[in-house]
């Protein structure tokens, strides 16, 4: 391509999108797009792009990727908008590939046969998502639009996955097999993670205030919460079993509340212990880093100590405190999966069941929602922190 | 009126302010001047009780401040600090409205007052009211700081090196602005600075401080003419005093007025009655003139001033 006119020099070709799309093109042709398994345990047979989708489907996938390479190179003013449409629609329609694949290859006479996503499909999904992130970054879109796009893609996936055509998909099979347990796991997971984050937020706030008022508290508190963080998570879960069982057998009231050596109680305690370090540290740092001159100005103008705290210090510290909540929430969602080992429930139980039964699809059924939850919490809390910064929200 | 009687402040074993006696009359601008660490800021912060004093008494309008509720005391004292101390999470309008809101004024009254103050400080409400402090220039931010201090119309204004962090040109403008506002609102003002020229320009009376004590408390002219010690003499600049004295007196004092003002060509760079003698002399030296015409604020020529007279009587 030759750079001739002023237009061409003003809009330089994008380098990221062609690289991603080209990798996607290569990988989707090299790797298996999908696999057919005669039943849950037996290893399946893989199918490449051409075999999976036929000439028309394979041609369409190739054409879309090639089109995005071309679009990102041409000096067109609205190319990112076009790319956004193309990539967004492709991502939303991705499950259709699996539907076509299943309809072509699934043996009709075998009720246990199932289709699953191959490495090629995962690569396509991953690289398309990266392309979308790059495009959104280039367009400098507003958060609300990004959220709408996310809802559109997720909504399309959920609708397609629930349709009859994908009933044979291994993930859908596992989901249907678990029935109400999936919803149960979701609620347990959310309750444990967010319960731990809320309780530790309150505790951290109190501790941070105490540390600010009284310098003697600083070292011991920071030392203690750092120590808690250094114990391996599995060890904390294990260590809590003995004292909690002893407690609940000594006080039967606790048993009626569901507090036992295993189950939700030790899981919640361990999650709180883990959440304390980032929470305490961020809250403390955020509050102490509000310049003393501002507090002084507030006092000098006639604010009471309470007004200085609630009208000046807290609002200025809030973005950093929320950053702490964000880190803690993501960490807690991940750790809750491990808590399934001591019978706490949540998505971790699918992962460990799946590992036990050598059923990778069941592992995925636990792992994918955990990842999705963490990403969702990350996005929401980042948006919240950004909206609380005064100037960035406006200008 | 603010009275400090034998006020002392200790930090541990060091004495920051040592038995200071100072009376600031209602409506005057008292400038505390001295090198850093001389106790001038500490003295200021004891007046609004941000720092409690170790000994002595501080009276505001005859009332002992230790007996008063500190919040009530401070709500009646505008406070301007170096680096503005504006709240970055509040808009300009919200920052100015701070004290009226603490005093629970009705909304319309606050809005009207914010508008009025922004105009007084030459800030356009339409363009600046909804900006955040980070979006303002240093000079604009400092104006907002002054507007915030004046918001609830306090009797007393405390200013702690308010123009210390802005560039020389902006500082000059802010000083002129402050003189103009002071003529309009007549606040009892305590102003802390380390810049003797700023002190000479703004003060009704100057209190020179050194090592926690007030060395001399007098009018700018007397400080220049009769410095009480070598320290004061070196602070005001031994050799430079002639010109400094000239800069204290307006052209009006030594000009020869015309019988009636002549309507004349109004130019931007003319000498005005309010300008000081030092400027008049500088204009004459630069343009090599024996005399120069003087104009009033309406652009009418009201008299002339001669080089001879300035040199004879100027300092």
Image (spheres, coloured by chain):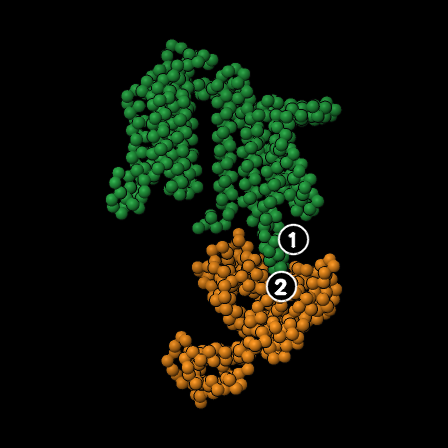
Chain colours: A green, B orange
Q: Secondary structure at mark 2?
A: loop
> Circle 1 sits on which residue?
A305
Q: What x and y, as percent, mark residue B268?
A: 40, 75
**Label 1, residues with CA under 10 Å away: few <14, some 14-19, many ≥20:** few
Q: Are marks 2 and 1 on the same chain?
A: no
Residue at the outermost front position: B239
**Chain of residue at mark 2:** B
Q: Going by the image, does B239 lie left or right of A78? A: right
Picture quarter containing residue A282?
top right
Q: Secondary structure at mark 1?
A: helix
Q: Nearer the viewer, mark 2 or mark 1?
A: 2
Quadrant location of the N terminus of chain A in the rendered image: top left
**Label 2, residues with CA under 10 Å away: few <14, some 14-19, many ≥20:** few
Q: Residue at x 47, y 19 (%)?
A: A361
Q: Residue at x 29, y 29 (%)?
A: A63
Q: Residue at x 57, y 47 (%)?
A: A317
> Circle 2 sits on which residue?
B36
Q: What x and y, as percent, mark residue A93?
A: 36, 28
Q: Residue at x 32, y 18 (%)?
A: A51
Picture quarter containing residue A252?
top right
Residue at the outermost top position: A109
Q: Is residue B33 visible?
A: yes
């Amino acid at each position: 391509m030759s750079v001739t006119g002023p237009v061409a020099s003003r809009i330089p070709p994008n380098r990221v999108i062609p690289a991603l799309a080209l990798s996607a093109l290569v990988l989707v042709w090299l790797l298996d797009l999908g696999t057919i398994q005669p039943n849950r345990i037996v290893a399946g047979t893989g199918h490449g792009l051409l075999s999976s989708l036929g000439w028309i489907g394979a041609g369409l996938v190739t054409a879309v990727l090639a089109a995005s390479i071309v679009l990102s190179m041409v000096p067109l003013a609205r190319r990112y908008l076009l790319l956004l449409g193309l990539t967004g629609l492709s991502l939303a329609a991705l499950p259709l590939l699996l539907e076509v694949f299943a309809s072509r290859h699934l043996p009709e006479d075998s009720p246990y046969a199932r289709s699953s996503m191959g490495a090629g499909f995962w690569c396509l999904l991953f690289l398309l998502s990266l392309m979308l992130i790059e495009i959104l970054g280039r367009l400098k879109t507003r958060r609300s639009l990004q959220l709408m796009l996310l809802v559109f893609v997720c909504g399309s996936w959920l609708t397609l996955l629930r349709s009859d055509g994908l009933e044979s998909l291994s993930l859908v099979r596992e989901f249907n097999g678990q029935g109400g347990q999936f919803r149960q796991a979701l609620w347990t997971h959310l309750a444990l993670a967010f319960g731990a984050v809320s309780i530790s937020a309150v505790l951290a706030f109190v501790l941070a205030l105490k540390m600010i008022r009284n310098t003697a508290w600083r070292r011991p508190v920071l030392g203690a919460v750092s120590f808690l963080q250094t114990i391996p998570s599995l060890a904390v879960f294990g260590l809590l079993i003995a004292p909690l069982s002893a407690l609940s057998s000594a006080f039967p009231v606790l048993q009626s509340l569901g507090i036992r050596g295993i189950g939700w109680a030790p899981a919640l305690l361990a999650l709180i212990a883990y959440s304390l370090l980032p929470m305490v540290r961020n809250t403390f740092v955020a509050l102490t880093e509000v310049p003393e001159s501002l507090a002084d100005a507030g006092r000098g103008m006639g604010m009471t100590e309470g007004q200085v705290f609630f009208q000046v210090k807290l609002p200025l510290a809030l973005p950093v405190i929320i950053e702490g909540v964000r880190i803690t929430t993501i960490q807690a969602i991940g750790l809750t999966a491990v808590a399934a080992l001591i019978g706490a429930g949540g998505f971790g139980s699918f992962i460990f069941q799946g590992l036990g039964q050598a059923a990778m699809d069941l592992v995925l059924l636990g792992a994918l929602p955990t990842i999705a939850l963490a990403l969702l919490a990350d996005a929401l809390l980042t948006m919240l922190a950004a909206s609380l910064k005064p100037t960035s929200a406006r200008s | 009126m603010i009275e400090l009687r034998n006020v002392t402040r200790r930090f541990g074993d060091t004495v920051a302010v040592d038995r200071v006696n100072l009376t600031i009359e209602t409506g005057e601008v008292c400038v505390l001047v001295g090198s850093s660490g001389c106790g001038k800021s500490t003295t200021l912060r004891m007046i609004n009780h941000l720092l409690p004093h170790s000994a002595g008494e501080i009276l505001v309008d005859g009332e002992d401040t230790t007996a008063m509720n500190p919040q009530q005391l401070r709500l009646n004292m505008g406070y301007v600090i170096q680096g503005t101390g504006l709240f970055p999470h509040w808009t300009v309008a919200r920052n100015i409205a701070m004290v009226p809101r603490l005093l629970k004024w009705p909304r319309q009254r606050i809005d009207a007052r914010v508008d009025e103050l922004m105009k007084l400080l030459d800030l356009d409400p339409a363009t600046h009211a909804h900006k955040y402090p980070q979006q303002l220039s240093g000079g604009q931010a400092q104006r907002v700081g002054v507007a915030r201090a004046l918001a609830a119309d306090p009797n007393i204004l405390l200013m702690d090196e308010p123009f210390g962090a802005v560039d020389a040109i902006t500082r000059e403008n802010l000083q002129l602005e402050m003189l103009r506002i002071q003529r309009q609102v007549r606040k009892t003002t305590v102003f802390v600075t380390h810049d003797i020229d700023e002190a000479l320009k703004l003060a009704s009376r100057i209190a020179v401080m050194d090592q926690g004590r007030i060395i001399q408390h007098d009018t700018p002219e007397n400080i220049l003419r009769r410095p009480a010690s070598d320290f004061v003499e070196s602070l005001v600049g031994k050799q430079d005093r002639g010109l400094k004295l000239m800069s204290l007196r307006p052209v009006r004092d030594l000009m020869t007025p015309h019988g009636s003002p002549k309507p004349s060509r109004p130019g931007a760079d003319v000498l005005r009655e309010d300008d000081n003698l030092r400027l008049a002399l500088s204009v004459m030296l630069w343009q090599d003139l024996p005399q120069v015409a003087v104009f009033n604020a309406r652009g009418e020529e009201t008299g002339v001033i001669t080089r001879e007279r300035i040199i004879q009587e100027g300092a």
